[in-house]
Image: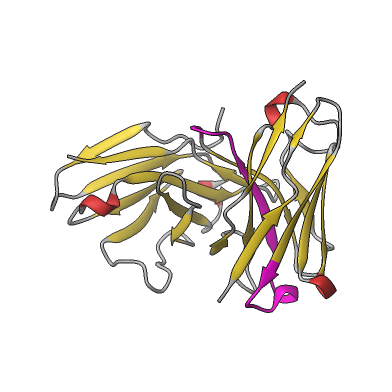
């Protein structure tokens, strides 16, 4: 049982945009500006793509963007490319000073 | 090059102990908080424990509190995870991950992981 809830899968065609949601509570997502997103390709370590809700690390494509509304954070990928096919995880700092991850979302590029 | 290399993973019987290590290089280790994150094959990520740059701020997931101990040796640029009373549900790939200096809540560099299998 993950503390944060993500859809198990999403899909989209090349060039389209998709959004992955991540729902928590006021004790995590809604209470802090500390939501991050990670991309993980099969057999690889996770890669940071969004931190502090909306910020992109250097080198991450501008096609990736983050947002938040109340207790739900979202990751939007625009202009889908084949290489975006991967698992995506949200994470948030919590009121217990721990980190929580979502269960992960598998993105399929059709 | 910023690098994290985990080691110490093994096949171990339930109830036994194991110590994981993470060797850091390419950055100023004593300026960075560090975390351990694990992943059951085919499943999602689970945060395990985190430690501040000085080793004084330490936090654990409920699933490992009281059994696991995170520590660091800044002189050796190394992070550790002492795992006691291991259970079958501790079986996973264990990653160490770096936090950028001045932060705690996200991880920008990850190792490749070391595999722990708990089975009789």
Q: Where is residue A73 in the image (x, y as percent from the top left)?
A: 41, 48
Q: In which quarter of the image is the N terminus of chain B?
A: bottom right
Q: Where is residue B39 in the image (x, y as percent from the top left)?
A: 58, 39
Q: Please report the residue visible at 71 percent of the width from the left and 73 percent of the height from the top.
A: B29
Q: Please report the residue visible at 86 percent of the width from the left and 27 percent of the height from the top.
A: B15
Picture quadrant where residue B52 is located: bottom right
Q: Can residue A9 be seen in this view?
A: yes
**Magenta region includes residue A11:** no
User: Observer-nearest residue: A8 or B18?
Assistant: B18
Colour convention: secondary structure
Q: Please report the residue visible at 32 percent of the width from the left and 33 percent of the height from the top.
A: A9
Residue stretch rendered in magenta on the structure:
B24-43
Q: Position of residue A59 (x, y in %)?
A: 37, 72
Q: Please report the residue visible at 41 percent of the width from the left and 74 percent of the height from the top.
A: A58
- In the displayed structure, A42 sits above or below A50; it is above
Picture quadrant where residue B41 is located: top right
- In the displayed structure, A72 sits above or below A33; it is above
**Magenta region includes residue B31:** yes
Q: Is residue B99 visible?
A: no
Report the number of discs: 0
User: Observer-nearest residue: A3 or B85?
Assistant: B85
- In the displayed structure, A80 sits above or below B27; it is above
- In the displayed structure, A6 sits above or below A56; it is above
């Amino acid at each position: 049982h993950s503390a944060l809830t993500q859809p198990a899968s999403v899909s989209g065609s090349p060039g389209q945009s998709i959004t992955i949601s991540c729902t928590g509570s006021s004790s995590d997502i809604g209470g802090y500006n500390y939501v991050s997103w990670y991309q993980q390709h099969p057999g690889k370590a996770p890669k940071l793509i969004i931190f502090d809700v909306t910020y992109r690390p250097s080198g991450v494509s501008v096609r990736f963007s983050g947002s938040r509304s109340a207790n739900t954070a979202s990751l939007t990928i625009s202009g889908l490319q084949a290489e975006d096919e991967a698992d995506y995880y949200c994470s948030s700092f919590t009121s217990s000073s721990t980190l929580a991850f979502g269960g992960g979302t598998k993105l399929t590029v059709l | 090059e910023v690098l994290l290399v985990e080691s110490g993973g093994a096949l171990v019987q339930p109830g036994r102990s194991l110590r994981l290590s993470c060797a850091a290089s390419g950055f100023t280790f004593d300026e960075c908080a560090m975390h351990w994150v694990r992943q059951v094959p085919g499943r999602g990520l689970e945060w395990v424990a985190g430690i501040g740059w000085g080793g004084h701020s330490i936090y654990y997931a409920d699933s490992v509190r009281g059994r696991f101990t995170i520590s660091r040796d800044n002189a050796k640029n190394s992070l550790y995870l002492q795992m006691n009373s291991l259970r079958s549900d501790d079986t996973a790939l264990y990653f160490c991950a770096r936090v950028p200096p001045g932060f705690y809540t996200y991880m920008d560099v990850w190792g490749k992981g070391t595999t722990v299998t708990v089975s009789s």
